[in-house]
Amino acid sequence: MATATFAAGCFWGVEARFADLRGVSSTEVGYTGGTTSSPTYEQVCSHRTGHAEAVRLEYDPQQLTYEELLRAFFEMHDPTQLDRQGPDVGDNYRSAIFFHTSEQETAARDAVRKLQAEGRYRRPIVTQIVPVAPWWRAEEYHQKYFAKHGRHGCAL
């Protein structure tokens, strides 16, 4: 098994999309990339902690490659929107890839270069590609939110 961490806006929708992929064995939503230890949802939404709403997932590289995860990541959101996705605005909704290995970093940078070269987007890709940072599990009511409450409430 391998681990991957992505931020692409409201973590409810991102988690649901990744959870649907064959080869993903578990997902968890949380906060990463900020400066506050053990932040709460309210603190993250205050835009004073620097954290992104993110999804950490475990996957089987024999069934699903990291490159396939990257493809899904770029298809599920607009990586040209800085600090927002649709109606969700703020640094906590930024587009980011938190790499766990140098291979993941290389794959992420290659994916961005390829997308830019293809001209798929009219604006530059603003997705951050940064080393994995301390992970803080979000409150339980955020875990598997769409499975519990239906698919409403965020841009994805």
Image (spheres, rainbow, N blue to C red):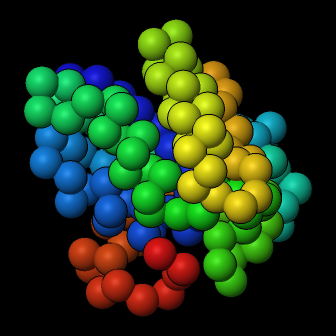
Left or right of residue 8, residue 150 in this image:
left
**Residue at horizontal 25%, vertical 56%?**
19
The percent position of residue 124, horizontal first and vertical second, equals 76, 50
Extreme residue toward the right, this view: 48
**Against 30, is 101 above or below?**
above
**Against 63, is 62 above or below?**
above
Q: Which of the two residues, 60 or 117, is positioned nearer the viewer here?
A: 117
Left or right of residue 141, residue 150 in this image:
left
Residue 49, can we see it?
yes
Which quarter of the rendering shows the N terminus? top left
**Residue at horizontal 34%, vertical 30%?**
66
Residue 30, can we see it?
no
**Residue at horizontal 42%, vertical 89%?**
152
Extreme residue toward the front, this view: 118
Left or right of residue 113, residue 2 in this image:
left
The percent position of residue 6, horizontal first and vertical second, equals 51, 44
Q: Which of the two residues, 106 or 134, is positioned nearer the viewer here?
A: 106
**Against 17, is 88 above or below?**
below
**Residue at horizontal 64%, vertical 58%?**
121
Q: Which of the two residues, 68 or 123, is positioned nearer the viewer here?
A: 123
The percent position of residue 155, horizontal first and vertical second, equals 54, 80
Q: Which of the two residues, 91 or 21, is positioned nearer the viewer here?
A: 21
**Against 59, is 78 above or below?**
below
